[in-house]
Image (cartoon, rainbow, N blue to C red):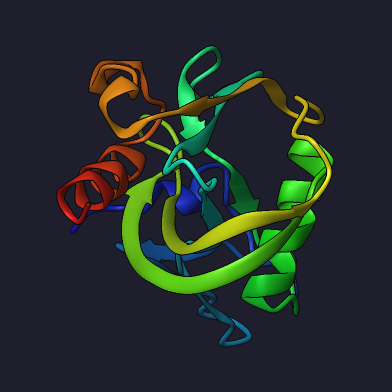
Amino acid sequence: MGRSPFFDGWKTCPRCMTDLDIVDARAICPECGLVVYANPGPTVSGLVLDDEGRILLARRAADPGRGLWDILGGFADEGEAPLETLARELREETGVEIEPLEFYGAWPDRYGDGGIWTLNLYWTARIASGEPEAADDVAEVRWFAPDEIPPWDEFAFENTVDVLKAWKEGL
């Protein structure tokens, strides 16, 4: 498997400052016994759809993927339920309140080239109130009909492309 990028920069145990043994996806302290696993970071995103069958996409304002398209969403905070993450992220990124609909699926990916692994959870959703406007770390938001979605090489993450392909195939 190889050393996980999760441990880039890790050298010593945060408890006792002993040099760590890092093997594949875990760091082990030979002195105090601490073991840390390189678990994926959970993200939650929404396939926000309107009554015309269009999907709301965002152009990223920051790296990784600055200037590329993405599905709205982001990382879950510690202790936060997935649907709380979805509502918070959509509010932060677009200013809208959403109504989650159905769980769509889960896809693994990397957060940028060589970045940490993520586990990306998707729900369909609709806007309950507000008009979407780019905010937070979003440069632009735009509605797309299924046949108007940008080319796949204009998306920031492989899992986004996989999700959109699955969505289009299911129409």
Query: Relative to the observer, which residue lies in front, 39 or 97?
Result: 97
Q: Where is residue 36 drawn, in percent x and y?
A: 53, 75
Q: Where is residue 12 drawn, in percent x and y?
A: 63, 59
Query: Relative to the observer, which residue lies in front, 70 or 171?
Result: 171
Residue furthest front as drawn: 52
Q: Where is residue 101 drawn, in percent x and y?
A: 54, 71
- Residue 94 seen by the camera: yes
Q: Where is residue 146 drawn, in percent x and y?
A: 31, 33
- Left or right of residue 62, residue 67 in this image: left
Q: Which residue is drawn at 54% across and 76% down?
A: 29
Residue furthest top as drawn: 67
- Left or right of residue 124, residue 152 in this image: left
Q: How many labels does the image show?
A: 0
- Left or right of residue 70, residue 82 in this image: right
Q: Work out whether 80 lies above or below 42.
A: below
Q: Work out whether 22 lies above or below 134.
A: below
Query: Relative to the observer, which residue lies in front, 131 or 151?
Result: 131
